[in-house]
Image (cartoon, rainbow, N blue to C red):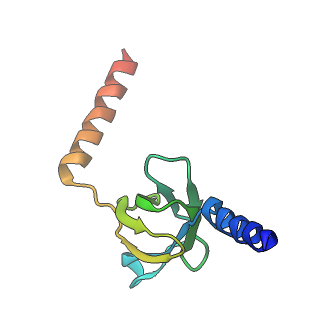
Amino acid sequence: MKFIYTLVFLMVAATGFAQSTGTIEGHLLDQESNNGPLNMAKVTIKGSESKTVSDAQGHFKFENLKPGTYTLVSRFVGYDPKEITVEVKPETTNKVTLEMAASTISLDDLVSLASAEQNSASVSDK
């Protein structure tokens, strides 16, 4: 009888120490190419060191995340950064899709850039 109590105690203790984690997996899509996959884009979890890069199909994955709320930030050169908040629950895979759009430059930004370059050139000529 003692053996059964000990066995039950060990099983309960083992499950109590086991930490339930969740997963976030998703796809990055390129709005400029009719939502084709966006590969080699950086995806990070805001406020942490966790980061990954999307593969050729635009797929990325974060595993073994403690339950809680996470903000994913995706970045790619020439595209506007995109953020999404995800609620991670134990033993659950959260699937997300992020559509990224190319960044635009305004005429004012272009004029400011040209003006700064012109001023830099005239200062260095002196």
Q: Is residue 121 left or right of residue 7?
A: left
- Where is residue 60 shown, x and y percent of the image? 56, 71
Frontmost residue, 89 versus 13 = 13
Q: Is residue 13 left or right of residue 92?
A: right
Frontmost residue, 8 versus 33 = 8
Frontmost residue, 8 versus 101 = 8
Q: Can see residue 53?
A: no
Q: Residue at x 38, y 20 (%)?
A: 125
Quarter holding residue 62: bottom right
- Where is residue 40 shown, x and y percent of the image? 57, 66
94 relative to 106, above or below: below
Q: Residue at x 35, y 64 (%)?
A: 84
70 relative to 93, above or below: above
Q: Residue at x 33, y 61 (%)?
A: 103
- Where is residue 28 shown, x and y percent of the image? 46, 73
Query: On the rendered image, what quadrant is the N terminus found in?
Result: bottom right
Q: Can see residue 111?
A: yes
Frontmost residue, 82 versus 68 = 68
Q: Residue at x 52, y 59 (%)?
A: 66
Residue at the left extreme of this rendering: 108
Residue at the top extreme of this rendering: 126
